[in-house]
Image (cartoon, rainbow, N blue to C red):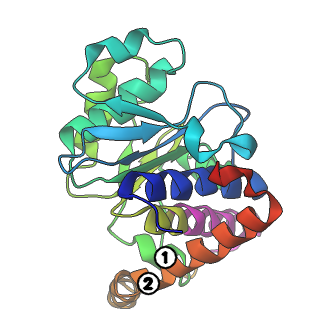
Amino acid sequence: MAYTHEEQIRIDLAATFRIIAHLGMHEAVANHFSAAVSQDGKQFLLNPKWMHFSRIRASDLLLLDADDPQVMERSDVDATAWCIHGQLHQRLPDARVALHLHPIYTTSVACLKNPGIPPIDQNTARYFNRLAVDELYGGMADSMEEGARLADLLQGKSRLLMGNHGVLVTAPTVGEAFDDIWTLERSCQILVTALSTGQPLNVLSDEVAEKTARAWEGITDFSRQHFEEMKLLMIRQDPSLLD
């Protein structure tokens, strides 16, 4: 079956919610994903307020306009989601997909006095010099000013480690965004596990870390295929996500 551009993005984003819930990376009925459907990036899809990731269908996703101030008044839109994702899609047209999560290991690393991901293996090296860090957490991101501040931190970067909060990842496609946030959480799991031994970290040299990060950037097809395989698994488990 042939899908329109928006229909395909709806399916891919719905599948991402299901995958994240399947992997236990969600947080209650919080956190939000968005994906632009218009060329200028300002028309975008967003999950409804307080709907569990495991049951989101393609048709459940809200189509919003980043330039519409009335969205803030809607009962089906979470204020923090609108303030973050609305500002992001208004200010960063190249950030086609944005995933915001509070996964356990990444959030743990974000809570360190000096948050960051040193390159100690192939996964962590993916983020060498490629991760923006926010150390100014001031509570719920429920103001346009806070959303704008977070969007500005992503200028020139595609990932934001949100101190005392979680993580925000952007990408050109849903598949690349999913694989990125999955690898980021795996990287932090490896880092936290290594730190738990109490032994010094064996950090890669800058040269090797940079070489590895660039190699990752050359295999976006791997990222997209990882997503396609996981999406197929979700569809087979529950085809209702296509509805």
Tell me the quarter of the picture where residue 236 sits: bottom right
Give above or below for 155 relative to 119.
above
Q: Is residue 108 magenta?
A: no
Tell me the quarter of the picture where residue 150 sits: top left
**Residue at screen point 56% across, 46% down:** 112
Identify the residue position indicated by label 2 in the image.
221
10 Å neighbourhood of mark 1: few (<14), some, or many (≥20)? some
Viewer-side residue, 235 vs 53: 235
10 Å neighbourhood of mark 2: few (<14), some, or many (≥20)? few
Viewer-side residue, 227 vs 91: 227
Q: Position of residue 240 (x, y in %)?
A: 73, 50
Say what secondary structure mark 1 lies in.
Answer: helix
Say what secondary structure mark 2 lies in.
Answer: helix
Q: Is residue 178 left or right of residue 159?
A: right
Q: Position of residue 160 (x, y in %)?
A: 39, 50
Q: Is residue 184 left or right of residue 236?
A: left
**Residue at screen point 53% across, 60% down:** 181
In the image, the segment drawn in magenta is 181-201
Give the mark count.
2
Q: Amino acid at mark 2?
A: Asp
Identify the residue position indicated by label 1 in the image.
224
Cα gap from disc 2 to disc 1, whole angstroms: 5 Å
Looking at the image, which residue sits at the far front?
1
Q: Amino acid at mark 1?
A: Arg
Q: Position of residue 234 (x, y in %)?
A: 73, 63
Looking at the image, which residue sits at the far top?
73
**Residue at screen point 68% across, 58% down:** 19
Query: Which mark is drawn over residue 68?
Result: none
